[in-house]
Amino acid sequence: MTLKRFNIRVYGLLLHQGHVLVSDEIIRGQRVTKFPGGGLELGEGTKDCLIREVREEMGVEATDLRHFYTTDFFQQSAYDPSEQLISIYYLFSLAEVHALSYGTAPFGDNGTGAEWFRWLELDTAVETMMSLPVDRAVLALLTSEC
């Protein structure tokens, strides 16, 4: 299939006490572990996108956004072969990390069927813990810096 468009995704990296926050969710019937974030909307800046996604997904306000990584290799979308994926990652902070709702087990039952957030320990994290190719590359960068 011929590529027809770009799909720009913006993700957040929340670090806390040697851990990074990840999201477990069901996407198109598949279990996916990824970093929190989502798609850039028309007329939206990348930082504004992440702030919106964090607010929608976690119910908290992301602050102190700092660029960490932008995809520097070709990545075809896993969900639409006509799209080229471009992913942008920001480190961010929260005023109250403890205000987050999270668990410890992958795909735990939070009673809502919504995304499930949990902390990955960076000292023991390996790329294969992430489902998406770009997230794997970003986790490798994170763990190499710790």
Image (cartoon, grey):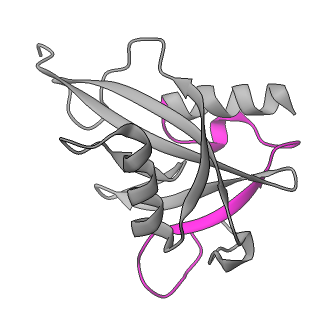
Indicate yes or no whether the magenta region holds residue 113. yes
Q: Is residue 45 above or below residue 141?
A: below
The answer to whether residue 17 is seen in the rendering is yes
Q: Is residue 70 above or below residue 35?
A: above
Seen at 52% across and 48% down, the residue is 34
Seen at 53% across and 60% down, the residue is 24
Report the front residue among 58 and 51. Answer: 51
> Residue 116: which quarter of the image?
bottom right
- The spot of residue 140 in percent (x, y) is 71, 27
Q: How many marks?
A: 0
Q: Quadrant of the N terminus?
A: top left
Seen at 64% across and 36% down, the residue is 128
Examine the residues drawn in magenta and state their main secondary structure: loop
**Which stretch did the figure color magenta?**
106-133
- Residue most extreme to the bottom: 111
Seen at 46% across and 31% down, the residue is 88
Q: Is residue 19 above or below residue 55?
A: above
> Residue 101: which quarter of the image?
bottom right
The answer to whether residue 104 is seen in the rendering is no
- The spot of residue 3 in percent (x, y) is 15, 16
Looking at the image, residue 64 sits to the left or right of residue 142; the answer is left
- The spot of residue 73 in percent (x, y) is 45, 11
Indicate yes or no whether the magenta region holds residue 34. no
